[in-house]
Amino acid sequence: MLLHVKNLVTCFYSDEDVNRAVDDVSFSIPEGKTVCIVGESGSGKSITSLSIMGLIEKPGKIEGGEILFEGVDLVQSSPKYMRSIRGSKIAIIFQEPMTSLNPSYTVGYQLDEVLRLHQKHLDKKARYEKVIEALKLVGMPYPEEKYNEYPFKLSGGQRQRVMIAMAMTCEPKLLIADEPTTALDVTIQAQVLELMAKLQHEKGTSILFITHDLGVVAGIADEVVVMYRGHVVEKASAKELFTDPRHPYTKALLNSIPTPGRVKRKSRLETVDESIDYLQFPKEIR
Amino acid sequence: MTLFEIKNLQKHYEVKKSLFAKPSLIKAVNEISFEVKKGEILSIVGESGCGKSTTAKLLMIIEKPTGGEIFFEGKDITKFSEAELKEYRKKVQIIFQDPYSSLNPRWKVGKIIAEPLLLNSDLNDKQIKEKVLAIMQKVGLKKEWYERYPHQFSGGQRQRIGIARALVVEPEVIICDEPVSALDVSIQAQVLNLLLDLQEEFNLTYLFISHDLSVVEHISDRIIVMYFGDIVESSDVDSLFTNPTHEYTQTLLKAIPKIAF
C-alpha cells in the first residue's frame, strides 16, 4: 500500500462549537490504482485530501489518526518534511484551473518553479526541456509558444492540462485530483480523464480522485469510498458499488441521477431524504 | 400551438484586439431558426461558448439581436412597445444557473419573490403578500421563511426561491438557464422533480438550457444541439439519443460518462 489513512479526524473550531469535518475516516490506496472519494458538498471529501497534503490551516486541525505514506506518518511529520514531498512525491490538482494558476506569471515560469524547488540538480536548459516535454505529454498544442503565454490566454481545458503537467513533472507517487473536471465541458472532461489514465499507465502513479460525479467514478475508479457528513458510509470496488450498492445513502445517491434505461423518462427521481440521518445505518465496508 | 417562432436569429459581437485594430466579429448566434410549442419542454444543449445562453438572453430581450426575428404568439418581440413589453415579461420568465448571484443578498425572500409583481402588476401590498405566500408553499418553501435573507438558505432552497420568483406572475413560458448545474446530484433531483410537477400543474412551457445530456434526456420532449453559434441538430429525444446524425452530437454523446458494468 502506498497510502494508508487510519481513523483520520479533522476538526474545525469556531467560537461556539467544533465541526468534525472528517470523522474517523480510513481507507488505503494501492500502488498504481485509482481510488475515488464520492460525496456531496460538505461530506468532507476535500478536507480529507487537504489533510493528506498537510494543508489544513487554522481554525482547522487534524485531531486524530494516522496518514501513512510510504510508511511515514504525515500527521506527525515536520512542516519541512511536508514541503519536501509536496509537489514532488504527492501532487494535487484543484477544481478551478482559473484560480489555481498565478495570473501574473507565464505558464513556463510556473512549471519551471516546481523543478527549481524539487530537482535542484537540473540546470536552466535541462529544466526548459523537461517543461516542454511535460507540456507535450499532456497534449498541449504548440508547447514552445505556450511556454511564454500567461494563463488568461489559455482555455479552461488547456489550463487544466497545465495543472496536470505541473503535477506530473516530478513524477509523483500519488496524484490527488480534487474535482479536476467539474468546471470543464464534457468533451474536454473526456480528454482530461483519458490523459490521466494514460499517465497512470505509463508512470504507475496512484490517483486519489475526488468527485461528486458518479458517472466519472464508474469510468475510472478501482475502489470507491462514499463519504457522508464526514464519515465513510460505504467502501467497495467500483463494480461492487454500482452493481450491488448496500448502504441506504449510496442507494439514494445512485437513484437520484437520471440514468437512461434505469430511470423512466420524466418520472420523479428518488432523492436523498434530508430528514433521515443516514449515519444510523451500519457502515458497509467491503 | 406555436408559442415562439425564431427566424434566422443572429447575434454578432464586434471585438477590437487593440485600439487601432480592425474589429473582428464573434458570431455568438449565427442565423438560427426554431419553434417552441405550447406545453413542451424544449432543450438547447451544447458546450461553453456555443451560444445557448446568448439565445436565452435574446429571448428575454436582455440582449438585442443583430439580425432575424423572434415571434411570440405571432408578434415580433423586437418591435414591442413599452406596454407590450410589460405584458411579455409577465408571460415569459427566466430561472438562472447560479442561485447565489441571482438573488439580491440585501432583500428578504418575500420581496425577492414579489419583485416581478411590483413591476408588472397593479395588485396592492396585501394581495401581493398572499400571492407570494401561496407560491412559496407550491415550491416547497415554508411560510416562516418570508422574512429571511438569501444567505440563510442552501443552494437547493435558493433555486426554489428563483423558481418562485419566476412563477409568481403566472407565466406561460419559463426559460431555465442551467437551473440545476450548480447543485449536488440529490438536490438536482429535487429541483428537477419540482420543475416537472409545476409544468404539469400549470401547463407550462420550458425552454431548458443545459450542458448535461443525462438531465436533458430525462426531462425533454425535443432537443436542439448548438455548436459554435449554429444549430447542428434538432429532433425529438428518442431519435437524438438512438440515432444522432451530426458528427458533433455523436462526439457529445460519446463523451458522457456512463455507469455501466
Image (cartoon, coloured by chain):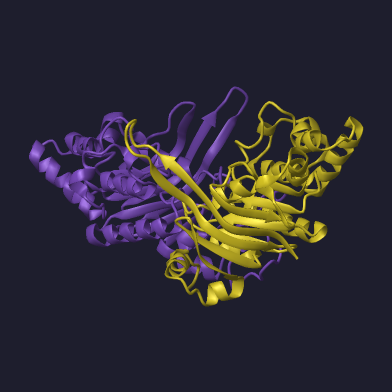
Chain colours: A purple, B yellow
The residue lying toward the viewer, choosing from B57 and A193, is: B57
The residue lying toward the viewer, choosing from A109 and B227, is: B227
Q: Residue at x 27, y 44 (%)?
A: A166
Quadrant hosting residue A35? bottom left
Q: Position of residue B59 (x, y in %)?
A: 63, 49
B64 is higher (above) or lower (below) than A224? above
Quadrant hosting residue B208? bottom right
| Residue with the most extreme top position | A15
Q: Position of residue A5 (x, y in %)?
A: 41, 47
Q: Is residue A10 left or right of residue A17?
A: left
The residue lying toward the viewer, choosing from A129 and A235, is: A129
Q: Residue at x 12, y 46 (%)?
A: A129
Q: Position of residue A263 (x, y in %)?
A: 64, 69
Q: Is residue A39 left or right of residue B24?
A: right
Q: Position of residue A104 (x, y in %)?
A: 30, 30
B104 is higher (above) or lower (below) than B243? above
Q: Residue at x 33, y 44 (%)?
A: A154
Q: Residue at x 79, y 37 (%)?
A: B120
